[in-house]
Structure formats: structure tokens, C-alpha cells
Image (cartoon, rainbow, N blue to C red):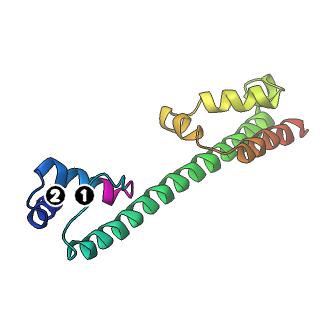
Amino acid sequence: MLSAFIVRIWEYEWTYFTAFYFFFTSLTTIGLGDVVTKTPNFIIFNLAMTLIGLSVVGLCVAIVQAKVKLVFDRMLRSIDAQYRIRQVDPHVATMSIVEDEEEGVKRLIQSQSLEDRIIFLFVDEHKKTMLKERWRQKSSMVN
């Protein structure tokens, strides 16, 4: 809100909403181009704002990427835990009950928290295939 006020000071003909809209589209690097500054000195401020916006967007992508990796690693550990449970008591282990790796990974996903299930939607196909392969590998191992 303060930044929109600063934009409004330089572009005094704009409404507060237009200044906020310009600031938001510049910061999020959307930059539709429908609102353009008339003041040449403001270009430097806009450039700095765009660089900050790129940093924020990059940081958000990195955070999501790290969370996806965390969920993937947690699911790998869950498969390993199912294997260990199977070694101790094969009658209660999901790995003993479900032979098919598709169904096994599906049940594994369903047993996760809602947050992890939502994040799992962003896991790429290669990693999903790796999970299925790990399930198949561990479920075929014999005591």
C-alpha cells in the first residue's frame, strides 16, 4: 500500500487504484503494459521494483520446489517403512496386502496429510515412476 502511495506521488494524475494496479503488475512481473508511466525518473524505480519482483517470484518457485522434494523424500521413507513393517509382521503391512505398485503408491498417497496430497500433484512423472519402482522393488524383496 505504501509503494502504491509512492507511485501515486510520481504519477499524480493516476488514481490510487491505478497506482496500486501498476505496482502489483510490476512487482509480480506480469507487466501487462496497459498502464505506463510518463515520468522518466520513475523508470529507475520501476526497474528496481521489477528486479525485486523477479527475486520474489524466484524465491516462491524455489520454496515450492523444496516442498515438493520434501514430500517426495517423505514418501520414499514411507515405502521403506512399509518394507520394514513387512519384515516384522507381514500380515499388517500394506506392502503385503497390495501387490500392484500403482495401487500401493495410490494408497500411500491417500495415507498422507491433505497438504502433502495437494503438493504431490506437483510431483513430475519421473519422480512418480521412481516411487512406483521403489514400491515394486521393496515389495518383491523376500526375507
Residue 77: x percent and y percent? 67, 46
Q: Quadrant of residue 112?
A: top right
- Please tell me the numbered disc located at residue 23: 1
Vertical arrangement, residue 133 with respect to residue 55, above or below: above
Residue furthest out toward the front:
38
The N terminus lies in which quarter of the figure? bottom left
Q: Residues within 10 Å of mark 1 (few under 14, many from 20)?
A: many
Q: Residues within 10 Å of mark 2 (few under 14, many from 20)?
A: some
Identify the mark nearer the N-term, 1 or 2. 2
In the image, 140: left or right of 106?
A: right
Vertical arrangement, residue 136 with respect to residue 11, above or below: above
In the image, is residue 37 part of the stretch drawn in magenta? no
Q: Looking at this view, is 110 or 16 the one in front?
A: 16
Q: Residue at x 58, y 42 (%)?
A: 122
Q: Quadrant of residue 93?
A: top right
Q: Looking at this view, is 106 or 78 the one in front?
A: 106
- Please tell me the numbered disc located at residue 4: 2
Q: Disc 1 residue type?
A: Phe
Residue 143 visible in image:
no
Mark pair 1, 2: CA separation: 6 Å
Residue 62: x percent and y percent? 50, 59
Q: Which residues are magenta?
A: 25-30
Mark 1 and mark 2 in contact? Answer it, CB < 8 Å: yes
